[in-house]
Amino acid sequence: MEHFRERDRDKNSEKEKEFVEKLVKLNRTAKVVKGGRRFSFSALTVVGDRKGKVGWGFGKANDVSEAVRKSMDKAKRNMIQLPIKNGTIPHSIQAKFKASMVLLKPACSGTGIIAGGPVRAIMEAGGVSDVLSKSIGASCQYNVIKATFECIKRIMDVKKISRDRDRPVRELWG
């Protein structure tokens, strides 16, 4: 009976390793109480499988490891599909969340990920190897991540478009 549990544990560890986990921001806040300062932590993370699935999470706790764990769990629950064509995104897109705006452009092979902090983490975790990006407006990392995920949601999926237009995928993408 014991060896079955070990095998299950091995499967879980393999499942966990298939995701790329990136810590985007760790924040410490202090509350002054009678005995001194009480610290709490918040973590903003991005999780992806490098095959087109990516998610983000935000967690708070009284210690760092618990905050990171909570944010990773939320990120794994909130994963969405990122359409990738030849290592880049299919078309240019921009989206805004509050005062942050993110512009994503496809790039030719060999360009790499030209992006700052949060956008770079999302693209690396999602498996995009070539993309150009620009963050405009407020640089709050939480808002930049939300704007980037809004971009990803707005990217048109070729399979859905081919079904809607009754055209083969080859005809649409060339």
Image (tube, grey):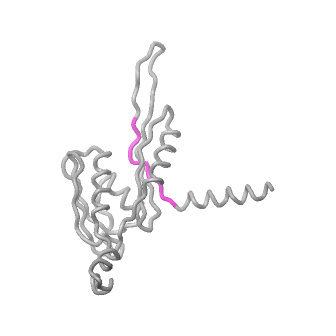
| Residue located 33% across and 67% down the image | 112
Q: Is residue 170 above or below residue 152?
A: below
| Residue located 31% across and 61% down the image | 153
Q: Is residue 67 above or below residue 3?
A: above
Image quadrant assignment for residue 123: bottom left
Image quadrant assignment for residue 99: top left
> Which stretch did the figure color magenta?
19-27
Can residue 22 be found in the magenta stretch?
A: yes
Q: Is residue 13 left or right of residue 69?
A: right
In the picture as drawn, the residue positioned furthest to the right comes out as 1
Q: Magenta-highlighted stretch: main secondary structure?
A: strand
In the picture as drawn, the residue positioned furthest to the top comes out as 34
Image quadrant assignment for residue 113: bottom left
Q: Nearer the viewer, residue 136 or 94?
A: 94
Query: Can you say which quadrant of the picture contains the N terminus?
Result: bottom right
Query: Can you say which quadrant of the picture contains the C terminus?
Result: bottom left
| Residue located 43% across and 63% down the image | 53
Can residue 72 be found in the magenta stretch?
A: no
Q: Is residue 23 left or right of residue 92?
A: right
Q: Nearer the viewer, residue 41 or 58?
A: 58
Q: Position of residue 156 (x, y in %)?
A: 28, 69
Q: Position of residue 114 (x, y in %)?
A: 28, 62
The number of numbered badges drawn on the structure is 0
Q: Position of residue 171 (x, y in %)?
A: 28, 86
Q: Position of residue 67 (x, y in %)?
A: 48, 39
Q: Is residue 168 above or below residue 12?
A: below
